[in-house]
Amino acid sequence: MIAAAVCDIGQLRQTNQDYVFASDAPVGPLPNLLIVADGMGGHNAGEMASSITVETILKEVRQETEVPDDPGTFLARLAQDANYEVYKASLENEAWRGMGTTLVAATVVDGWLYAVNVGDSRLYRILKNEEGQTQLIQVTEDHSYVWGLVKAGILTKDEAHVHEKKNLITRAIGQEPDVEVDIFAENMEDTAQLLLCSDGLTDMLDDAEIQRIVSFPGFTPEEIAENLTKRANDNGGKDNISVIIADLRGERQTC
């Protein structure tokens, strides 16, 4: 795997409340680890929520000594621990009251993807065949008002993309003492790359445009992440933009 990340402030925000971590090298017992958290709340509270979340996960992963039997359940436990830390911090500081963050985290172990999510940050699989054709598959489901309408058949995905309430999320890290975490496990046999991102990307680009950009041949993960971020900024950059690209067929060179 070769992983690259971009975390950009965008065109309109005064601060960057996103927090990302991307390692294609081992982190504790995990062979790799990818995380995107998109914070929310005033007075730097969103920035605190996302950083507490990611740093709590990293701290606990690094304390482990053996690869867990079920990496998905392991990641979910870490997400729940991070949720409690954010919730506790929000009670200890009035300026942080009500803060929260989305979370999507993933690792690939022995050819399997294990991932968790809370909120509307997303994980996609990018499939590429020998003819160069690319397919973008959304793994996670948004915990949002409009995604609920999509699942109910009331809105199409295209209609949800432009809906006035598309940023209203229904589940977040740090809002309550406990949180429900979605867990995913998928075989990566046909997957060339992974894309993790905050809604700062997906609000500015629809899936068709994302697929077009990741389809360009010959680009490194760093260049793909930068191209996606640039396009989101060109389209308005209304929020912080976080992008992680992980090339599952590549191998980072070491000296």
Image (tube, rainbow, N blue to C red):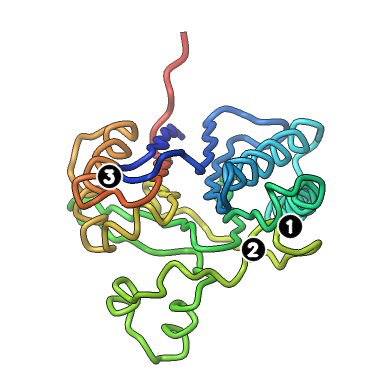
Three-letter amino acid code at the position of disc 1: Thr
Three-letter amino acid code at the position of disc 3: Leu
Q: CA distance from mark 3 to mark 1?
A: 31 Å
Residue at left offset 44%, top offset 67%: 167
Q: CA distance from mark 2 to mark 3?
A: 26 Å
Three-letter amino acid code at the position of disc 2: Ile
Return the residue at label 1. 73
* Above or below, comparing residue 77 to residue 228 in the picture: below
Tag 1 near tag 2, CB within 8 Å:
yes
> Which of the labelled discs sits on residue 149, or is there none?
none
Residue at left offset 69%, top offset 40%: 52
For marks 3 and 1 on the same chain, the one whose residue lies earlier in the sequence: 1
Provide the secondary structure element on which disc 2 rests: strand
Residue 23's spot in the image, x, y percent?
Answer: 54, 31
For marks 1 and 2 on the same chain, the one whose residue lies earlier in the sequence: 1
Give left or right: position of 56 versus 210.
right
Provide the secondary structure element on which disc 1 rests: helix
Give left or right: position of 129 versus 180.
left
Nearer the observer, 24 or 199: 199
Provide the secondary structure element on which disc 3 rests: helix
Residue 248's spot in the image, x, y percent?
Answer: 43, 41
Give left or right: position of 135 versus 5.
left
Return the residue at label 3. 228
Nearer the observer, 49 or 123: 49
